[in-house]
Image (cartoon, rainbow, N blue to C red):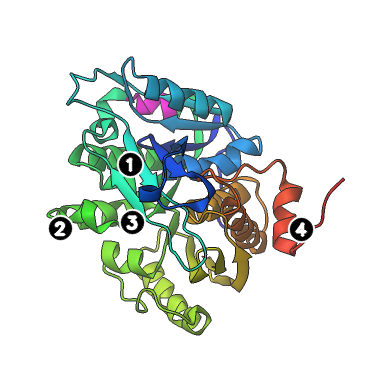
Amino acid sequence: MSIELRKDFTYSLIVPTSMGVRITPLNGQPVHSSDTFMLQATSAETNVASISSYLGLPVKVLTTFVKDSPIAQFIKNNLASRHMVYEGPEVPQDGPWGYRHQFNIADSGFGSRGPRVLNDRAGEVGRTLNIKDFDLDRIFGEEGVQIVHLSGLIAALSPDTSTFCLELARAAKKYNTRISFDLNYRASFWKGREKELHDVFTEIASISDILIGNEEDFQLCLGIKGPEAGGKDIPAKIEGFKEMIGRVKGTFPNASVFANTLRQVVSANSHLWGAILLEGNNWNVVEPRQITVLDRIGGGDGFVGGLLYSILKGWEPEKWVQFAWATGAMATTFLTDYAQPIDEEQVWSIWEGNARVKR
């Protein structure tokens, strides 16, 4: 295996995040036509960490909460139910126009009608994530962490969170913790901050061990030329994806693992799902296969979660991409944004295409 992990650790995985809630209409209906919604706690980074936490590895969440908020308590209860430890300051709400946890308003789509997502992030408390609120020497030095997973969503959320992610990466490097970085480009986050964020993302990528993205992420975050984003006939573009990842590797030689998901949308409920993984000089490719989708949100996070779990378990790289493909596919069968695997066998059954009843 190309990634050597710390042996002295309290946490297998740590994720910094901004927690929020998602409200989703029932039965695949659009938001504007609905009057009954499901509420869930969510964030992309805890979606990733859920694979490890549900399968028994110790996970810690670094975040921030609104003080005395029932929504904050709802989130804390949810994280505890996912077997995650959390740490972070309690920020006073500061009146009705003050801080709150973000709201994600989204439907699942159905058939020929694609899903629509509205992010309502005004006053988001996660934008206050500040390095001064966390003792990095304790977290990385005394407690010990095998992998810290950073997301471009958090790195781009605010100037404070950009600094926060940079300092986390630097501390991880100092204490021999491996760094995973999922670029997660969002145009609205980058508006007016393009050069600043390019510099931040480039530094984090330069000391990362695992780099994850898609053709758009690598091009827009890091300036690496790649194939045209979107469109159909994804299998025909695989060589182009490989060439792009090769350029990423040449630019960021510290990293030893590069991953790129492949998705072609046939309908809201039918996708072609694949992946590319470069470990050292070895390619592992899952040609896109058809999956049935209940709710697509969180599929990419599920892939990353399965990849990190596989690395943490010390498996051979060939299994990393297989397990990650399966946990990504699994996430799309849940109404939550995150997969909740009961055991590894359940995941491997998805990889093997075995949907038979288990008695």
**Type of amino acid under label 1:** Arg
For image coordinates 27% across by 30% down, the residue present is 125
Which part of the image, by quadrant, shows the C terminus? top right
Compare residues 9 and 73 and report the one nearer the observer: 73
Q: Are marks 4 and 2 in contact (CB under 8 Å)?
A: no
Q: Which numbered disc covers residue 206?
A: 3
- C-alpha separation, residue under disc 4 versus residue under disc 2: 48 Å
For image coordinates 62% across by 58% down, the residue present is 320
**Type of amino acid under label 4:** Ala
Compare residues 340 and 194 and report the one nearer the observer: 340
Say if 345 sits above or below 212 in the image: above
Which part of the image, by quadrant, shows the N terminus? bottom right
Residue 136 is a magenta residue: yes
Say if 174 sits above or below 78 in the image: below
Q: What kind of secondary structure does the magenta stretch mostly adopt? A: helix
N-terminal-most mark, 1 or 3:
1
Q: Which residues are magenta?
A: 134-140
Residue, disc 2: 195
Element type where label 3 sits in the image: helix
**Type of amino acid under label 2:** Lys
